[in-house]
Amino acid sequence: MKVGKTERGLSREDARKDLDVEGCSDDEALIEKLENNKANLQSKVSKEVKENKNLQTSLEKRKGTLHERRLALEKEVETLRDQLHKERSLRASLESGLMNMRRGQVSLPSSIDSKTKANLEEVAAAEADVVNLKQKACDLRGQLSSQAQLSSISLCESCNKRLQDKLAEHGGYC
């Protein structure tokens, strides 16, 4: 009897060889499939790396731009704060200067610029002129009243009464 022959006529060794060949063939197909997957994944990873690099560069540029903009805005805010402080100081000086002028004092703070000082001095001069003109008007009313009283002595009694009534209405001299 021959060892290893089956009823079909193939030995067990032949059957194993066929299985080994089929197994190799399956392994080769699996290896090829894995290598293709590996190549595809490497390609995708490469694309992702490239896209991420571009995004990182874009992000860095944007970050730099925002940083520069923030610094510029901080500088503008500081400038505006300084300007606001100066304007408030000027307003306080102007208010103080106007109040002092009304009381007859003409001492202007040194923080006021020359144009503003000139304007305040002009206002002070105009206010002084108004005060002087009011005083002159009052003096002239007084002189007119005195003149009217002197003239009324020579007038008749009825005319004198009307003149005195008018003087009483105006409160005398001023």
Image: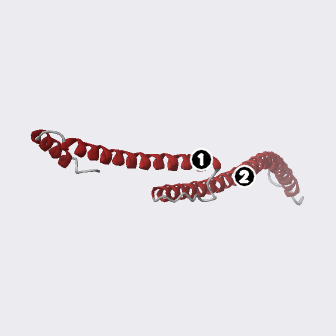
Residue type at the position of mark 1: Ala
Q: Which quadrant holds the N terminus?
A: bottom right
Report crowding for label 1: few under 14, some 14 to 19, many 20 or more residues within 10 A (C-alpha).
few
| Structural distance between the alpha carbons of marks 1 and 2 | 51 Å
Asked whether the viewer can see residue 109, the reply is yes
User: At numbered mark 1, what does the secondary structure look like: helix, strand or loop?
Assistant: helix
- Whichever of labels 1 and 2 marks the residue nearer the N terminus, that label is 2
**Could you tell me which residue is drawn at 52 percent across and 48 percent down?**
125
Report crowding for label 2: few under 14, some 14 to 19, many 20 or more residues within 10 A (C-alpha).
few
Q: In the orientation shown, which residue stands out farthest toward the front?
A: 154
Q: Residue 92: horizontal and vertical position, in percent? A: 53, 59
Mark number for residue 118? 1
| For the residues bearing labels 1 and 2, Cβ distance under 8 angstroms | no
Taking the image as shown, residue 162 lies to the left or right of residue 32, namely left
User: At numbered mark 2, what does the secondary structure look like: helix, strand or loop?
Assistant: helix
Residue type at the position of mark 2: Lys
**Could you tell me which residue is drawn at 29 percent across and 43 percent down?**
144
Total label count? 2
Q: Residue 112: horizontal and vertical position, in percent? A: 61, 54
Quarter of the figure with residue 155? top left
Taking the image as shown, residue 42 lies to the left or right of residue 79, namely right
